[in-house]
Image: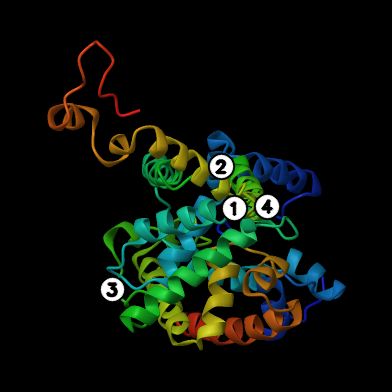
Amino acid sequence: MSIEHLTDDEVDLALIGEEVPAGAAAHLASCLVCRRRRDSFLAAVNGACGEDPDETTRARIRERALSAWSGAGRRPHWVRWVAAAAAVVVLSLLPLLRSELVSRPKIDTDAVLTEVDDVLSRDPLSAAAPEEVVEAVVPAPEADGEGSWS
Amino acid sequence: MASVARQETPLEHEDELELVGMAQQGDRDAAEALLERHELRVFRLCRRLLPQGEDVEGAVQETMLRALRGLARFSGEGSFGGWLVAIALNLCRDRLRRRLLVPFQPLETGEDEAAGPLAVVPSSEPSPERVAMARQAVERLRREVARLPRRQQEVFTLRFFAGLDLAGIAESLAVDVGTVKTHLHRAVRRVRAAVEEAKP
């Protein structure tokens, strides 16, 4: 064993966890003074560290975090992908829906007007008022067939 | 050193990535296993970085919840433990900023902590003098760590209280290992000197 004790820097290296020179490491392994110097520091560290929580406390903290996570806030991983895919589908369908609205068949106004003219020519009052009103104002002729509007 | 955890092996890293993948799919058991692996480290970190009176359990719980909710963002490039510690670190910084308090506990030693250093003091028969010395060393260490610049405090805490190795600290702080070494050397030199002053 070398009689040269570790320097401050070598003690620090040993404490930090870095590699110490080979000679210093051998000395540390066999020198009670240097080991005590290192260990008293580590003892102070452990003292300052304090007591670790017991298993019950640790389990309680863990359980709270897991419950909060698995509650409303958590979604299965695939839900996000499904939601994204659904959004893409809706967005891609929007132009189609719009063109569907725009390309709706136009009303044939000539045909409509022709049909209206036809109805009016047969019974003009039916277009102006409901049938019962027409019946009240202009009673239907007797069954002999005279006085017919047509 | 009891507070420094061993380094993760590649096999454990693979296993952990598998757990992360399952948790990302919503597997509660996998998420619980992940938290259980690293919760002690997060607890130690929060307790040392947050001032006395701050809700440490609440901070640990919040750290866990932030991690679980942000699981989709974890790429798996680094370790899950390092990522979790980074979340805890940011949470502690937020709380300290909000309260504008000095981190670390004051010098009073709680009764529950008084016996702590004695268990590891290298002596089979702790005399009253040794007990007093050990307490004094702990107090000096706490005081000196509290006086360190913020980044040195964080590096020291991550190394000695949370038990991260140099690479893990670098990952958590998003800096290179050389920077970690520089801060850690300065911090250890200062704190060790203070602790050694407690010797007769």
Check residue B71 in the rendering and tell me which mark sits there, or answer none. Answer: 1
Asked whether the residues under marks 3 and 4 belong to the same chain, the reply is no
Tell how many labels.
Answer: 4
Disc on the earlier residue, 3 or 1: 1
In which quadrant is the N terminus of chain B drawn?
Answer: bottom right
Residue plotted at (62% across, 61% down): B83
Q: Quadrant of residue A12?
A: bottom right
Q: CA distance from mark 1 to mark 2?
A: 10 Å
What amino acid type should be assigned to the residue bearing mark 4? Answer: Ser
The residue wearing badge 2 is B31
Residue plotted at (24% across, 38% down): A129
| Residues at circles 2 and 4 in contact by the CB criterion of under 8 Å | no
Q: Chain of mark 4?
A: A
Q: Quadrant of residue B165?
A: bottom right
Q: Is residue A80 left or right of residue B115?
A: right
Which of pointers 2 and 3 indicates the residue nearer the eye?
Answer: 2
Q: Position of residue B4 (x, y in %)?
A: 61, 59
Q: Is residue B139 above or below residue A89?
A: below
| Residues at circles 1 and 2 in contact by the CB criterion of under 8 Å | yes
Asked whether the residues under marks 2 and 3 belong to the same chain, the reply is yes
Residue plotted at (53% across, 71% down): B157
What amino acid type should be assigned to the residue bearing mark 1? Answer: Leu
Which of pointers 1 and 2 indicates the residue nearer the eye?
Answer: 1
The residue wearing badge 3 is B108
Q: CA distance from mark 2 to mark 3?
A: 37 Å
Which of pointers 3 and 4 indicates the residue nearer the eye?
Answer: 4
The residue wearing badge 4 is A92
What amino acid type should be assigned to the residue bearing mark 2? Answer: Ala
Q: Quadrant of residue B198?
A: bottom left
Q: CA distance from mark 3 to mark 1?
A: 39 Å
